Amino acid sequence: MLVADVVRKDVPVLLEGVGTARPLKTVTVRPQVDGTILKIAFEEGQDIAEGELLAEIDPATYRAQRDQAVAKRVLTEKQLENARLDLARYQKIPGVVAEKTVDTQRAQVAQLEAQIKADAAAVAQAETVLGYTRITSPIAGRVGMRLVDEGNLVRAGDAGLAVITQIQPIAVLFTLPQQQLADVNRALAAGEVKVEALGTDGKSIVDSGVLKVVDNQIDQQTGTVRMKADFPNATRQLWPGQFANVRVRVDTLKDAVAIPLAAVQRGPSGTFVYVVDDEQRAAMRPVTLGLMTETDAVVTAGLDAGSRVVTTGFGRLSDGTKVRIGEEPKPNAPAAPDAAPPAAAAVDRGEGDRRERRRRGGEARAERNEAAAAGTGTQGPVR
């Protein structure tokens, strides 16, 4: 049987939940102007940087509108320039031009100055609309399947060109029972709370992240509370829509007395372990357990560090039994050079016995044939 040492170590307090991976940002790229698509600049499944070109819409109509607005502004500027010159002439010779004419000219100058501002705004609007013909990515992420091809006529507000999702970093939405909410809030108040995303085997750690959000209410139907953790997802093991098991580290038990979980036995009086003393005798000892993980159990009373507990072979154990501590077999251990395989030895012994029986049977038949020939005078052998 095997034994293990009772040790003191730091044991993390972990809460387990099930969640779903969600992108931090999801954008459906839609056209903002009407026109024919001249170019699709992305490949399906491509990683897109923020501001990278996705598609181009025919800009001819919108470029003409921009040029028209620019020309209108230039015309107003020339009119303003001429109106200012006339006003200056009227003011050079006082008393020659009527005061009403001077006031009218001054008002015209102010009107043209206001018109300049309106024309500038019209030019800015035309430039903006023209810029909508070049569709760029608003975020960095991964583009999905293409929803429209080159040559199609699109209109503002159509279904869209593609969907872009931000995968790095990524979020995982998960739930925990409401009974564990107090532990999570206590850990958040103390500082950053680590969260681990597990693989499909439920043991390997896929990525490590940080708890970001605890929902502001508990779901009364399920008795759970939703939470969100962010993960860097550097190796892209998490994918939007993927189910993920998570572990939330809310505390760490410092210098706790820990034993392997396999050593814990349960009886009518509660939990107990078999402790091996210096004379190799097993003694049943009741223990009080605290936190239990997948591999370890924290002992709060009944054991001290330095003891040894039995982890296998409980069917042959009882209180006071002398035990023989075995070792795990070493892989690829070489066999003894003089030892023959048991199966081969059994085959050799069986073959030798058969040869001996055949030899003795042949001698007995020969003796019977000689006796028969002497008594009856016949020559035929006895079989």
Image (cartoon, rainbow, N blue to C red):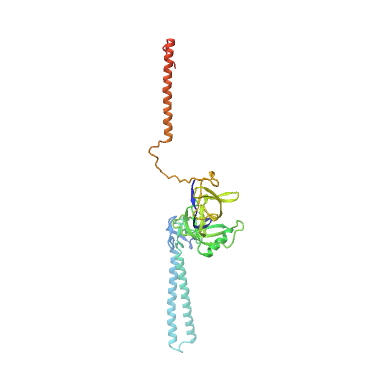
- Residue in the picture at 42% in, 30% down: 349
Left or right side of 286 for 363: left
Q: Nearer the viewer, residue 329 or 219?
A: 329
- Relative height, residue 35 to residue 204 (above, below): below
Q: Is residue 154 visible?
A: no
Judged from this view, the residue extending furthest toward the right is 220
Q: Position of residue 200 (x, y in %)?
A: 49, 51
Judged from this view, the residue extending furthest toward the front is 279
Judged from this view, the residue extending furthest toward the top is 377
- Residue in the picture at 43% in, 24% down: 357
Count of numbered badges drawn on the protein: 0
Q: Nearer the viewer, residue 327 or 12?
A: 327
Q: Is residue 102 visible?
A: yes
- Relative height, residue 193 to residue 271 (above, below): below
The C terminus appears in which quarter of the rendering? top left
Q: Position of residue 291 (x, y in %)?
A: 54, 56
Q: Nearer the viewer, residue 58 or 299?
A: 299
Q: Nearer the viewer, residue 80 or 189?
A: 189
Q: Position of residue 208 (x, y in %)?
A: 47, 58
Judged from this view, the residue extending furthest toward the bottom is 95
Q: Position of residue 321 (x, y in %)?
A: 53, 45
